[in-house]
Image (tube, rainbow, N blue to C red):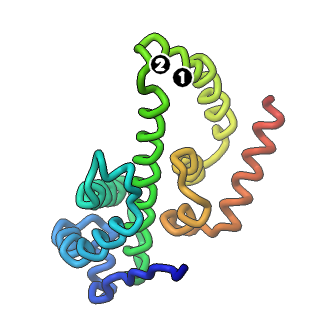
Amino acid sequence: MSKIRIDSPTDVSDSKFLSQLGMGDHEALATVFDKYRPALLQFTRKRLPFDLRRTAEPEDYVQIVFASFCAYLQNNTAHFTTSTDVWKLLTTIALNAIREGVRQVSRSEHFEGLDSHEAVDKRADPTAEVACNDLLATATATMNERQREIVRLRTHQYTIEELALITPHSSPRGIKRLFAGLRATLSRLL
């Protein structure tokens, strides 16, 4: 089976534009939407499972991607050096949105046919969730804000490679070291 390759648009790569985009400039965002939308729609169509097409169209996922992209730029200063960096971030967001859609469909099928009391009983114990959150907060208390953000994103299913791409001044190796330290801290706390 041959691998499907969808190339990113390459005509949005001048450094001034990428700098404006990284700062969340509205005109630059509109240009990204116009230039990347067709390629991102094709990318999403190729990867969207049939199960998800019952509840959402590929265009819905493209809208989710751009909304997430805008939200990311509002909350973070991104450093794009080439248009490939923009494309990688957009496709990462798309893949995460599709994964989340698959999880939601899976959850809804799991709870289908159960009454509301049975569904609540099958979910995780809220007390355990609070305890886990407290434990994680304690373990990350000595970390700086950037490191805590990396941990937070990892809990949202970002891969090490994706984190290295979207977090300024981070490498996969450095992120792996961060999580090795976190595991050691959690082991001591438990």
Give me the residue at 54% from left, 79% from top: 1
Q: Quadrant of residue 21?
A: bottom left
Q: Amino acid at mark 1?
A: Arg
From the image, which quarter does the C terminus lie in?
Answer: top right
Secondary structure under the numbered disc 1 in the rendered image: loop
Q: Is residue 74 visible?
A: no
> Do the CB atoms of the residues marked 1 and 2 lie less than 8 Å apart?
yes
| Residue 23 horizontal/vertical position (percent) | 30, 67
Taking depth in this image into account, of 125 and 123 the one nearest to the observer is 123
| Residue 185 horizontal/vertical position (percent) | 77, 40
Q: Quadrant of residue 173?
A: bottom right
Taking depth in this image into account, of 87 and 111 the one nearest to the observer is 111
Outermost residue toward the top?
Answer: 117
For mark 2, does the 10 Å Cα neighbourhood hold few (<14), some (14 to 19), or many (20 or more) residues? few
Q: Give the CA separation, mark 1 to mark 2.
A: 7 Å
Secondary structure under the numbered disc 2 in the rendered image: helix
Q: Which residue is mark 2?
A: 119
Q: Is residue 4 left or right of residue 40?
A: right
